[in-house]
Structure formats: structure tokens, C-alpha cells
């Protein structure tokens, strides 16, 4: 396996405040990674930096070997990119817009995911419930043929049946060699599908572990996260 994502010495400030400090990590292709952290830890900010939506930082970020903003943006499908879609747009128009904007958008893939998640193509985005809008966001994000998928809290405010559907869609449609980074603070939902766990705490990346190494200690991913959060796990 090769490094799909490499971050070196990443420090990011906003309004003179350090949001992330000296983040270093390497991620292989094909992995599903849980990016965990309490509210305000910096998960969304890290995703924005990786996706190229926050351009000014110290250090380097490379996705599939690309460090330049345009190449990085092309390699990453980030769920937050859908935030720019007007709420009066119908789902089928949003799909057309995605197909026009992203050359790697695969309509057939979208239709498969949409059918699986019962997405209504004629509904306007603004008329959808929170859960149904999340489904559209996930389907649009997964339908790009990207190297790296960044899903920012895909289960926030979602009922358990819908969560299960979204997780099943993720497992079924993630390309084998693509890497998926999912941020969450409810670890339980995604624990079983994770290959790797990263935890941000106190503005730093304090854990970056193989999920199986954690499981081998007899702890669940959730218990491990709680231990790190409570300072019960020593890190370098
Ligand atoms: N534009 C901004 N200006 C100043 N500070 C910001 C800005 N955006 C985010 N922050 C701060 O950066 C920190 C990290 O925020 P971020 O949204 O990345 O956290 P998060 O881990 O995604 O949180 P949550 O789980 O609540 O979504 C927070 O302290 C937040 O207040």
C-alpha cells in the first residue's frame, strides 16, 4: 500500500489563535479512518485544510502525491462542498450541477446509491429533512471517483435506521483503493468499519492507531477514545 495522504508539520491559525498545531501523519490508500475528537477539537478544520478550502497554513499536505491546491482539490471529495448548493435546487438539478463541476462524477454510481437510500430526485434540497439531506450529501460525495473521501459528521442528528443505511452505502460503494476519512464524536456508529483511528485533542493529533491494535488490547474503539480524552492513554 502507498501513502495516499501525508501531512507534515501542519499548523493552522485563525485570528491569531492556534486551531491545529504540528500535525504529522501518513495514511495508506484503501483505509477507512475515524477522525475523532470532542466538539471544537478541529476535525472540520483539518478536513478543510486537506480539501484545500483553507489555503493558508504552515507545513505541507499531500494527497496522492499532490501538494498544490488545484491538484489536491481534484483528488478529494469533501462532503462540505455541497454546502454551496442553493436550497431551492431540486435533487436532480444538484446532480446535474455536480456532473458539470466534477469530471470524476459518476451518475450511474449516484443512481445506485440514491436508489439504495431512497432519495427523492424531485425534492428541493431545502424541503428535505436533515436526515434525507445528509443522504443526498453522502450520495453526491461517494459518486465522485476520488482518491480521498472526507465525510464530516455524516451521522449528526440522524436516526439509527438512516445511520445504518448510510454506513451500508459507505461500505458498499467506497472504491477498494480509495481512502475514507470520517469525522464523528459518536464513535459507536462507525467503530466496526474503521481500519485506523485518529484523535485530535488540545489542538494536536494525539493518537493515530491501527483499529485492530486497539481491539487487540480488549478495548472497544469507543473506550479507547474515552481513555485518550480523559488522559488515561500516554502518547508521544
Ligand atoms: N473562522 C474561524 N475563526 C476563528 N476560530 C475558528 C474559525 N473556525 C473554527 N474556529 C475554531 O476552531 C476550533 C476547531 O473548530 P472545528 O469546527 O474544526 O472543530 P470540530 O472538531 O469540527 O468541532 P465539532 O465536532 O463541534 O463540529 C474551534 O475552537 C472553533 O471555534
Image (cartoon, helix red, strand yellow):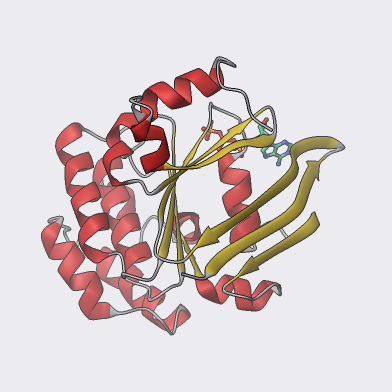
Which residue occupies the foreground of this view, 92 or 142? 142
**Where does the image place residue 182, in percent across and percent down from the top left?**
42, 47
Q: Residue furthest right?
A: 16
Say if 87 sits above or below 232 in the image. below
Residue name at image x 53 percent, y 26 percent: 38
**Where does the image place residue 148, in percent across and percent down from the top left?**
47, 65
Left/right of residue 169 with respect to residue 41 in the rendered view: left
**Where does the image place residue 82, in percent across and percent down from the top left?**
44, 59
Residue name at image x 49 percent, y 63 percent: 28
Can residue 213 be seen here? The reply is yes
Q: Quadrant of ligand 1?
A: top right
How many badges with numbers are in the image?
0
Name the quadrant containing residue 14. top right
Which residue occupies the foreground of this view, 26 or 117? 26
Residue name at image x 41 percent, y 81 percent: 104
Which residue occupies the foreground of this view, 188 or 108? 188
Position of the C terminus, as image quadrant, is top right
Left/right of residue 3 with respect to residue 106 in the rendered view: right
Left/right of residue 144 with respect to residue 15 in the rendered view: left
Q: Residue furthest front?
A: 216
Residue name at image x 26 percent, y 52 percent: 135
Can residue 121 be seen here? The reply is no
**Where does the image place residue 103, in percent across and percent down from the top left?**
44, 85
Amino acid at each position: 500500500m502507498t501513502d495516499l495522504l501525508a501531512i507534515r508539520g501542519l499548523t493552522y491559525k485563525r485570528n491569531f489563535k492556534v486551531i491545529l498545531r504540528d500535525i504529522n501523519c501518513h495514511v495508506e490508500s484503501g483505509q477507512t479512518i475515524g477522525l475523532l475528537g470532542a466538539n471544537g477539537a478541529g476535525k472540520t478544520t483539518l478536513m478543510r485544510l486537506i480539501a484545500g478550502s483553507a489555503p493558508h497554513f504552515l507545513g505541507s499536505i499531500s494527497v496522492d502525491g499532490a501538494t498544490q491546491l488545484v491538484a489536491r482539490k481534484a483528488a478529494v471529495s469533501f462532503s462540505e462542498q455541497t454546502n454551496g448548493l442553493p436550497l431551492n435546487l431540486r435533487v436532480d438539478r444538484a446532480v446535474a450541477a455536480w456532473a458539470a463541476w466534477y469530471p470524476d462524477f459518476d451518475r450511474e454510481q449516484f443512481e445506485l446509491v440514491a436508489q439504495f437510500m431512497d432519495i427523492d430526485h424531485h425534492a428541493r434540497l431545502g424541503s428535505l429533512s436533515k436526515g434525507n439531506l445528509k443522504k443526498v450529501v453522502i450520495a453526491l460525495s461517494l459518486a465522485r471517483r476520488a482518491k480521498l473521501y472526507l465525510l464530516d459528521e455524516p451521522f449528526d442528528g440522524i436516526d439509527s435506521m438512516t445511520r445504518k443505511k448510510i454506513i451500508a452505502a459507505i461500505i458498499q460503494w467506497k472504491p477498494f483503493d480509495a481512502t475514507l476519512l470520517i469525522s464523528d464524536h459518536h464513535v459507536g456508529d462507525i467503530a466496526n468499519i474503521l481500519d485506523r483511528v485518529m484523535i485530535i485533542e488540545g489542538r494536536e493529533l494525539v493518537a493515530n492507531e491501527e483499529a485492530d491494535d486497539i481491539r487487540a488490547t480488549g478495548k472497544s474503539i469507543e473506550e479507547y477514545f474515552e481513555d485518550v480524552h480523559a488522559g488515561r492513554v500516554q502518547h508521544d
